Amino acid sequence: MSIEKLELEIIEEFEMFDSWLEKYEYIIELGKELPIIPVEHKTEENLIKGCQSNVWLHAEFNENKISFFADSDAIITKGIIALLIRVLNYQSPESIMSSKLNFINEIGLTSHLSPTRANGLLGMVKQIKAFAMAFNLKTDG
């Protein structure tokens, strides 16, 4: 499924909730469903810089698609990375690099995060796009 279609799915899901408390609860549930990152990838080099809590992100490249694995020690942050992975997992490097990730603003996520969590979200997006760029360079070179 395309990134845009996945984003629309998420936007529609979030429209079902009346309050931000319900949306936070849903984000927490998404985090609980996130597949656990293999222990060998929970390393210092896979820690995302700029996050208030610890967030580990690992990526693998196979058949021109990127698979992401992540974990966090904070439940909200784990849900946020789960949302990003849901949209960007199994996509091509080119699709990830060109994605605008409009769903983040559409669901009101950035306006309902603390400044430090918003910085963490930005750090997560930057790291995902950096992986995409690196894998894209490998295929071009």
Image (spheres, helix red, strand yellow):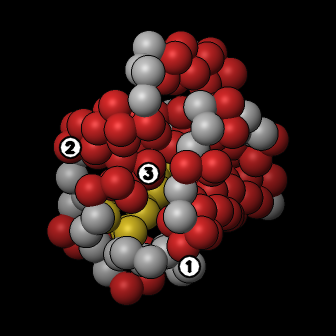
**Residue 46 seen:** yes
Question: To which residue does mark 1 refer?
Answer: 50
The amino acid at mark 3 is Ile
Question: To which residue does mark 2 refer?
Answer: 32
Helix, strand, or loop for circle 1? loop
Compute the Cα span from label 2 to label 1. 23 Å
Residue at the far front in the pictured view: 19
Helix, strand, or loop for circle 3? helix
Number of numbered tags placed on the structure image = 3
**From the image, which quarter does the N terminus lie in?**
top right
**From the image, which quarter does the C terminus lie in?**
bottom right
Location of residue 113 in the rendering, given as x and y in whole percent from the top left corner: 53, 56
- At a point 38% along the width and 69% down the height, the residue shown is 55
Q: Residues within 10 Å of mark 2 (few under 14, many from 20)?
A: some
The amino acid at mark 2 is Lys
- Judging depth in this view, the residue of 112 and 134 nearest the camera is 112
Q: Residues within 10 Å of mark 3 (few under 14, many from 20)?
A: many
- At a point 32% along the width and 80% down the height, the residue shown is 43
**Which of the labelled discs sits on residue 81, or is there none?**
3
The amino acid at mark 1 is Gly
Location of residue 122 in the rendering, given as x and y in whole percent from the top left corner: 64, 62
**Earlier-in-chain disc, 2 versus 3:** 2
Compute the Cα span from label 1 to label 3. 14 Å
Helix, strand, or loop for circle 2? helix
Location of residue 2 in the rendering, given as x and y in whole percent from the top left corner: 63, 20
- At a point 51% along the width and 43% down the height, the residue shown is 84
For residue 83, side relative to residue 96 (left or right) = left
**Residue 127 seen:** no
- Judging depth in this view, the residue of 36 and 111 nearest the camera is 111
Compute the Cα span from label 2 to label 3. 11 Å
